[in-house]
Amino acid sequence: MAYQVTGNEFLSLPTIRESDGAVEGITFLYMQVKGLLELRGNAGLIRPYWELDERRLPLRPVWSRAHCWIPSFTAEEQELRFSCTYLTPVGERGLILRLTVQNLGSAARAVRFGTEGEWAHTLHEINETTELTEGREVYESGWNHMFIFSQKPGLPLFAFAPCISDPQQFAEIDQQGQWSQKGFSYDIFRQTILQPGEQAMLDIPWGVGYDGVAASTSAKELLRQGFETVYDRTVRWLSAREKHLADPKLTELLNTNLFFAFFYASGRTVDTEELCLMTSRSPRYYVSAAYWDRDSLLWAFPAILAVDSAYAREILTYVFRRQARNFGVHSRFIDGTMLEPGFELDELCAPVVALNRYMEQTGDEAFSKHPFVQEALQMILCRLREKRHPSIPLYETFLQPTDDMHNYLYLTYDNALVCYALKALAKLLDRPELMDETDKTRQAIYEHCVKEQNHKRFFAWSVDLNGHYDIYDEPPGSLLLLPFYGFCEAEDPIWQNTAAMIRDESYALSFAGHPIAEIGCKHAPHPWILSICNSLLSGHADSALLHLSRTPLDNGVACESVNEDTGLCETGEAFATCAGFLSYALYTVCSPVD
């Protein structure tokens, strides 16, 4: 099944079926339930349709995406043209569909068009899915002069409502729309006689909120502003942030993934309006709606910082306030409490890396001086010291960058990140003595993590300081990125030998000789899209771009891994934080144009 996607800060439409344009479900973040809520229909929550002379016409959508983010389709049948645009206006707690039918023939035609659907399920999603079975209700309301879907398991949880007319502005807003509702099913439509060349239109806003008033007035606000107004405002927002490359196809790929990362790796909760971060707001991603320091700050954050520094600052405020207590813990809920235990060294370093990048790009030194930031940085330094070997300046981890168990305690990549973090902490905390520890850790890596094979020295993946080591790599934390993080130069022969080893056909997870010869790992034994990103950033841009051209990804959006021969998605659809790193890598390496 192929899907179109769109969304804004409050709402996500992660499953718009390409086959018929149906919206299977809408998702939104909710702080009190620590994750994602989704409204779904059995056949679809929102299903566009059209009829001629009371006969349903088939939909064979032809899709396009304005500014790589606003999906729409057209369909033609029996000299009629039907179009549907899915707009999630920036800054609004809602969405709006614009439907049009045009008579292309020479005779008058009796048409009916609109959307139908049903609210069948409410799902709570954080990695796994649980249905909320209590409190669903539907009622008519004067707030929108239609119906409201509401969930009240005791107190209100949320409401979702359309609005197609406003008696206070009847002259200005007269869509000739009608509606019917039976239980949790509905039909919103317009019927008219179209003369030759004539076109009819129907705009259907939906709002979401804590209760029926909040939801219905959010929809009414969109109706009163008008489709063109909110469309133009959203286009201006997208245009101000989209990036342009010399290659049009790469430009489309970059911006599609950039906006997917922006709106699916971050968002605002419906109940508290707080900005928060997560792996993906799409339930199609297998660990959706949870927070990882690494995923959000090493992958998604650089892309967001490149296009919106003010938003990036707000992200860091969330990170250093909400998430600081558990920095370095495997995964957390969006409210900062622990989801999965287990220490990860790369995740402990990630907030420092992100903060330092923000400082270097914006020059906003005042942010790091805030007491809550300084306190969190001191806590990171204390945790680093707890993980340091008693006599050798190497730092241990419990889990690897894939979140899987390590073979040996000391990972080369993780300790290279420690070097980056210590150097940054020396500046951020005004602790120049940390530069000495940085140098010592770097020397320890060269002393204990460099091994020799076939008379060539290379960086081992992990070591135990007793002579044991392994030859391995993981795309989520690859040895290919050592120069990217400033640990060594790309000309370093030890690093060059390492890169050659893990790309060689003798290394089982290199996939050398296949159409997509990018590195995989045991967590997902196929080429990773993150490996394409790593290749772009480590001097292998030509081969990475070739491999990228051979995969459709997840309908143009980054996924975790793809088949080494066909390029089809194997694991991790709708991987929002990876989409961020892909867009960042493309913009960093490819030729931008004004």
Image (spheres, grey):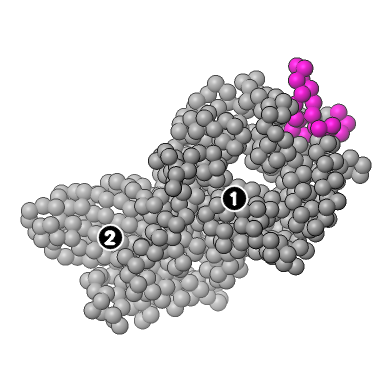
Q: CA distance from mark 1 to mark 2?
A: 37 Å
Characterize the local packing of mark 1: few (<14), some (14-19) or many (20 or more) Cα atoms within 10 angstroms: many
Q: Position of residue 541 (x, y in %)?
A: 54, 32
- Residue type (three-letter) at the residue carrying disc 1: Pro
Question: Considering depth in this image, is 522 or 428 the residue closer to the camera?
Answer: 428
SS label for mark 2:
strand
Q: Residue at x 67, y 32 (%)?
A: 490
From the viewer's perspective, tell me whether residue 418 is left or right of residue 285: right
SS label for mark 1:
helix
From the viewer's perspective, tell me whether residue 268 is left or right of residue 93: right
Which residues make up the magenta segment? 446-467
Which corner quadrant of the image does residue 1 belong to? top left
Q: Which residue is mark 2?
A: 99
Is residue 522 something one can see in this rendering?
Answer: no
Q: Which residue is mark 1?
A: 302
Q: Position of residue 133 (x, y in %)?
A: 52, 65
Which residue is at the far left? 107
Q: Position of residue 79 (x, y in %)?
A: 14, 50
- Residue type (three-letter) at the residue carrying disc 2: Leu
